[in-house]
Image (cartoon, rainbow, N blue to C red):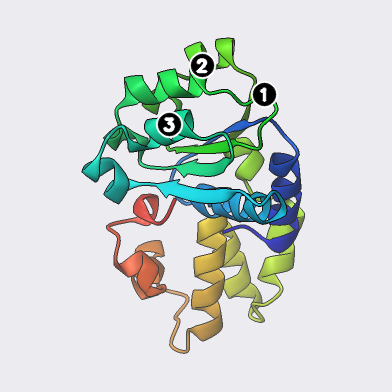
Amino acid sequence: MVTESHQGRLVERIASGHAIVVLCAPPGFGKSGLARDVARRLSVSGACAFREFGELEHSADPRAAANTLLSDQRQIVVVEDVHLADLKFLGLALERSNFDGGNQRVFVVLHQSSDLALARMSSRRSMDYIDANALRLRPQEIADALKSISNSRTRSRVRDLVGDWPIALELLCSWAAGSQDYDESWSDLDIVRESPRRIHRSRNFATVLA
């Protein structure tokens, strides 16, 4: 959900980091996609199994992710929707898993730090914490993406709406490229209504994609 240059730097940074990586930011910062990109890369280069745990897996067994962490040290694991997991057991598994000498890597995706007992975990484990500040778009990256919008007034309007939010840049640039009947009198809400279906299916920007 971020521009290629920014995505590439983050992938390199995370791939070379600690065994446990926590990505914590509000929805729309591309956390899940970034975690999967790194996990797939590592699983191929290290010949490890890649496992994902989200709403479906947690609903079937809230301890499934934790049991997987404890059972095999040659896995690349992405854990999302942690509020549906057995949080106490997951935290203990992250503390006690044996990462020494193995290829196991774990990526935990959170919307807010209170979703998991990070303070206790970080005091017992070395881990990388990737927050919204690391995932925000930089001014030059926004400027580069907006070059695709030919109309200067539309480009300025989109820049104001985007802020430094990766998913907003992607969706609004897509909208601007395909909008044939845009009128400058439209309100921000008008633009959101006419944006791609990924926004239509949500009640507002804050619920669009992790």
Determine the CA span between mark 2 and mark 3: 15 Å
List the residue tagged with mark 2.
Answer: 121
Element type at mark 2 = helix
Using the image, determine if residue 209 lies above or below residue 131: below
- The disc, 3 or 1, on the residue closer to the chain's N-terminal end is 1
Q: Is residue 68 left or right of residue 125?
A: left
Nearer the observer: mark 2 or 3; the answer is 2
What residue is shown with label 3?
112
Residue type at tag 3: Gln
- 169 up-or-down from 128: above or below: below
Q: Position of 110 compared to 132: left or right?
A: left
Which residue is the site of mark 1? 100
> In this rendering, would 114 be left or right of 137?
left
Identify the disc placed on residue 210.
Answer: none
Residue 76 sits above or below residue 158 on the image: above
Query: Label 2, label 1: how many angstroms apart (C-alpha)?
Result: 16 Å
Q: Depth check: give the residue in front, 30 or 176.
A: 30
What residue appears at the point 38 percent right and 27 percent down from the top-left corner?
Answer: 115
How far across and how far down the image is residue 23, in percent? 54, 37
Q: Residue at x 58, y 23 (%)?
A: 98
Q: Amino acid at mark 1?
A: Asp
